[in-house]
Amino acid sequence: MKRGAPAHVNSGPMDTPAVEVVDLVKRYGATTAVTGLSFTARRGAVTALLGPNGAGKTSTIEICEGFRHADGGKVRVLGLDPVADATELKPRVGVMPQSGGVPTGARAAEWLRLMASFHARPIDPALLLERLGLTSVSGTPFRRLSGGQQQRLSLACAVIGRPELVFLDEPTAGLDPQARMATWDLVAALREAGVAVILTTHYMEEAERLADHVVIIDRGAVVTEGTPAELTQGRREVRFSTAAPLDAVALEAALPTGGRVSATDSGGRNEYSVATDDPDDVGPEFLAAVTAWCASTGVLAEDLRVRRRTLEDVFLETTGRELRD
Amino acid sequence: MTEHTSGTAASAVTDAPKPALDASLFTPAPGAAPMWRMVAAQAGMELRVMLRHGEQFLLTMVIPVLLLVGFSLVDVLDVGEGARVDALTPGVLALAVMSTSFTGLAIGTGFERRYGVLKRLGATPLSRFGLLAAKTLAVLGVQAIQITVLCVVALFLGWSPSLEPAGVLAVLALLLLATAAFSSLALLMAGTLRAEATLAGANLVYVLMLGLGGVLFPTSSFPEPVEQAVSVLPITALGSGLRAVLTDGSLPGLGAFAVLAVWTAVAGFLASRLFRWE
């Protein structure tokens, strides 16, 4: 091996997935948190585990990180066993826990320098602090950092060693929009650099924006998975709201090809969704039929839009429950 | 929690992350640093955190120095025969060693476990052995500072220790063995109890040992059964051993070494079995 060359990048065939989970089971006493969960995460791609709190996301990710033992099934990380091959995996895998992980009295820059000193070819800590907007708090103890600053420092610690794979457990939970954007920028940069990213989230917007592959998890198992485009295709709908309730049956009768009208409950407002079985049927003429009926009955359709379904709709349809409950 | 709840909110605005991150910064190049560098860096971190911690500084430096100065100058305590500072210094040194290797280590490690620091370090290339080595070095570093300060203060107060080469070796051996015993007990406590329980328990033990362990006066002033009972405490073994060398100019009995060795073996075994990292 050439001196100075990345020592481990090529150990293990490159065609092995970043993470491979097959029929994973995890129990805590009488409760089964993970019930036969399977998914595969590609190298150099962003994979999002999306699901409500308590779905089994953190248990799954912590088993992949080697923190917990599986009660059943198979887990391979970079082709290796996360527990048996932990020594080989640790330099290659970056970890961002959901919270904490830093002594309250440690200062931001000194802790990041410590993390850098564990690695052979780390990113310059001062540079990474600057890129993450943490330079001004370099000397601030962890406990005095804001929530967003703590999260960003934790993220910096996960990537400082230039890993091949990073696990981010709820990287933007509780962050304000600005801090969330900063985290998204960093994930995008990691992906561009060829780093595999596995993140858990219960924000569907985060999964839609960042992920190459979305794995929707509920009650310890995979409900459905695919690219955001794959998951959200297959339905298109016209949505609008009105000042007063309208006659849904009459609207349905006025539509060309078997359109269905459903009222969605949105905090007391009259929200309507008009869809068809075949998404291609929701075209310009369909939209014209909806607005023509509105005009003929004197109804003003406010916030009118034609939209594809979202991951939130997918979750609702496949589990019968809201993502954020 | 939002950015704006903290006093650094203003800086969060001016110091906003740059929108475009240079992806080449993150090009994978993984690898672990050499073991010695990881241990040295971790030990330095532990040392700084210990020295910076206010309450720990009170237990490890302020109280021992105050006890030494106060009871050397004021005649309120029957410390036995000879110069007061000669009688007091060995016990205060023993207290200082215990304050770092037991009280400080237990509380620090307990809260590191509570805040997920031990778990997070478990995901780095630093091995558990490396972490223990770093903690040991940091404890020994703090103790070296404590012993230096206390010895200087004692010498100013007129301390005249008896220092034979064999005695100095015996003192070093006692200090190392006591550090091992106290550290094992600290890790046993920190690794099995809740952080708050460790905090309360470690402070209680500090106070009890201060009163019962022959720190300020020889345990020979206790009634016979009590003296027998406290003689198996690690701090009594350390204090009496140090007193034998530094005050009496003799060598410590094998009993002191045996007591410390048994505590080390039992607590070390239990800690290695029962320690939970999170």
Image: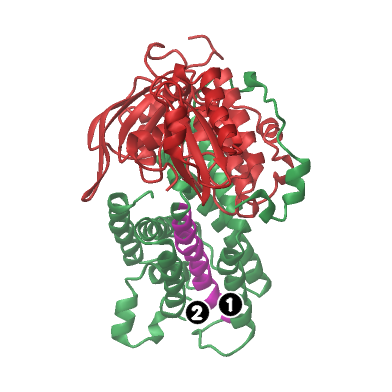
Q: Amino acid at mark 2?
A: Leu
**What residue appears at the point 45 percent right and 45 percent down from the top-left corner?**
A324
Answer above or below: position of B249 versus B225.
above
2 and 1 marks in contact (CB < 8 Å): yes
Chain ID, mark 1: B
Front residue of A199 and B239:
A199
Answer above or below: position of A93 versus A134.
above
Q: Is residue A121 visible?
A: no
**What residue appears at the point 69 percent right and 32 percent down from the top-left corner?**
A131
Cα gap from disc 2 to disc 1, whole angstroms:
8 Å
Chain ID, mark 2: B
What's the colour of chain A in the image? Answer: red
SS under mark 1: helix
Which disc number belongs to residue A167? none
The answer to whether residue B28 is left or right of residue B230 is right
SS under mark 2: loop
Front residue of B219 and A298:
A298
**What residue appears at the point 28 percent right and 58 percent down from the top-left corner?**
B266
Q: Position of residue A296 (x, y in %)?
A: 57, 33
Q: Where is mark 2, residue-wise?
A: B216
Q: Residues within 10 Å of mark 1 (few under 14, many from 20)?
A: some
Q: Position of residue B66 (x, y in %)?
A: 62, 76
Q: Which residues are magenta?
A: B84-112
Answer above or below: position of A260 versus B271.
above
On the image, which quarter does residue B21 sit in? Answer: top right
What's the colour of chain B in the image? Answer: green
Q: Where is mark 1, residue-wise?
A: B67
